[in-house]
Image (spheres, helix red, strand yellow):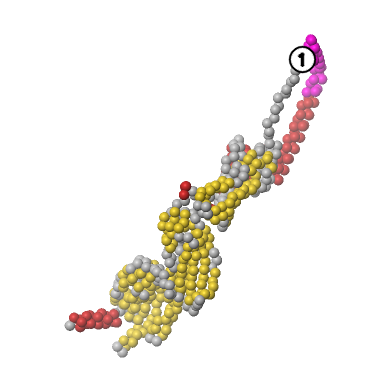
Amino acid sequence: MKNLGRIFILLVLFTNIIYAKVTATVEPSVVYSGESATYKLTISGEDIQKPALYDICGNDITSTASQTSIRYINGDYKKSNVLSYEFTPQKDCVVPAVTVKIDGKSELSNSVKVVVKPRSQNIGADFVLALTPSKKELYVGEPFTLSLELKQKEGAEALDSKFIAPEFKGFWKKGESEAKRTKENGFIVTRMAYKLAPQREGNLTIEPATLKIATRIGSNNWGTLIPRVKWRAYYSNTLNLQVKALPNNAKIIGDFTISAKAEKLVVNPNEPVNVNISVLGEGNLEDIESFKPYVQDVNVFDEKIVVDGNKLSQKLVFVGDKDFTIPSFELVYFNTKTGKVQKIKTEPIAIKVNGSATPKDNSVQITRDDSKQSASPEKVEVVKTKVEVKDNYILIGVAFVLGVLVGASFMLLSRREKSKTAKKLNLKDEKLLLIKLLPFKDIDAEVQEVVDILEHNIYSKEKKALDKRVLKELIERYSIT
């Protein structure tokens, strides 16, 4: 009797579903994390008002579709409409009942449960992803290679594909290689590599890479095959790496060489000396700070460090008016080959400045020879010259006129030279202008203001307007060439 009761209940439910005006389903009802599912409403009736759905279980609707189908039930043809909503569920949920207005009446659908399973790697699938690190135990900042391999069975269908790389949270991404494809043992194998470095100590996890593959499937509606596209996700393995702190409070790790080269060793006063610093090797070059040193009585400014692959470069400019020495540039790092903290440095560079002031003995030494002195001092006769007052006035007048003429000529020539100098100097070369004006910034407020604008324009993306009239006046004022 109990079995008959259960059968009766199932028959009632099945009959209700057949004759229900709104039936809700989810295909598939069990999905893996990251995969999409389709929520369907099958509606029977003529005058149908589509429900306003904006999300499914709190997940955005990524696409919608509708189609009309005809079914033969109990000797009668039944017309129905199917509304499809694609979404990507993040966790288990129950899609609540939906109200649909059919032929002027409100009809309620059934609720549907969706089960989401954790994503996992399927070794026997048509598409297989694998992540392999060159090291599993690392120091903070230590570079390593992460290899990615994708195997696709020959003949496996793929209408479209979407590859989603791991986010690499907690790692610096230093680069990636080009993908290379080969055929091996019935598989099409694609390989590529990422260059990474851990940012902090502890247990760090690299989440799986994801490959979404679109394939064509067909649904049969009353003998009619309707093609549809189905997306399926494939996942790689998860990686757990152990990262240790650098010993002895070191900040840089790797194996490096360092060099510094000055473009000139002999310059004129206030002529810039460009020095190029290069660091080569494997390591966390991004963490190396500016090499800008302090040199007494010398203006020094640095350009931004540039890292390109395994090379770091930086340009420094030194400006002085007397001989000076550029000090050694040092780099302290933890050497991955020796397992010890190591210091490397360049040699000091001596710069000769032409016309540099050198200390001289300007005192006059008087040698006294008493043997050659006479017994009595010689008399010195003072001769006084008398000049007539009239002649004196004439001489003064002539001297005054000549002085005015010479002075005027000198000023005129000086202005012409300064004007030529201002024209010769390229006012668009902001770095050169900065170098030329630096020696005068502490003695002239206008120069300081111009220097601030030049430094802002050189080291900032935003540009400030520079008054060329003021700039020319300063160039003329200090005879800058």
Q: Nearer the viewer, residue 445 or 184?
A: 184
Q: Nearer the viewer, residue 11 or 252?
A: 252
Q: Position of residue 384 (x, y in %)?
A: 80, 14
Q: Position of residue 3 (x, y in %)?
A: 20, 82
The kind of residue on which mark 1 rests is Asp
In the image, farthest residue toward the front: 338
In the image, farthest residue toward the bottom: 75
**Could you tell me which secondary element the residue under label 1 belongs to?**
helix
Magenta region, residue range: 369-396
Splitting the image into 4 quarters, where does residue 105 fall?
A: bottom left
The residue depicted at 55 percent of the width and 66 percent of the height is 178
Q: Is residue 181 visible?
A: yes
Q: Position of residue 392 (x, y in %)?
A: 80, 20
The residue depicted at 29 percent of the width and 80 percent of the height is 17
Quadrant assignment for the C terminus: top right
Quadrant assignment for the N terminus: bottom left
Check disc 1 and report the residue beneath it. 370
Q: Nearer the viewer, residue 302 or 329?
A: 329
The residue depicted at 45 percent of the width and 62 percent of the height is 167
The residue depicted at 73 percent of the width and 22 percent of the height is 365
Q: Is residue 106 visible?
A: no
Left or right: 102 in relation to 134: left
Splitting the image into 4 quarters, where does residue 71 fall?
A: bottom left
Q: Is residue 452 above or below residue 144?
A: above
Q: Nearer the viewer, residue 476 or 183?
A: 183
Q: In the rendered structure, does residue 374 fall within the stretch colored magenta?
A: yes
Q: In the rendered structure, does residue 378 fall within the stretch colored magenta?
A: yes
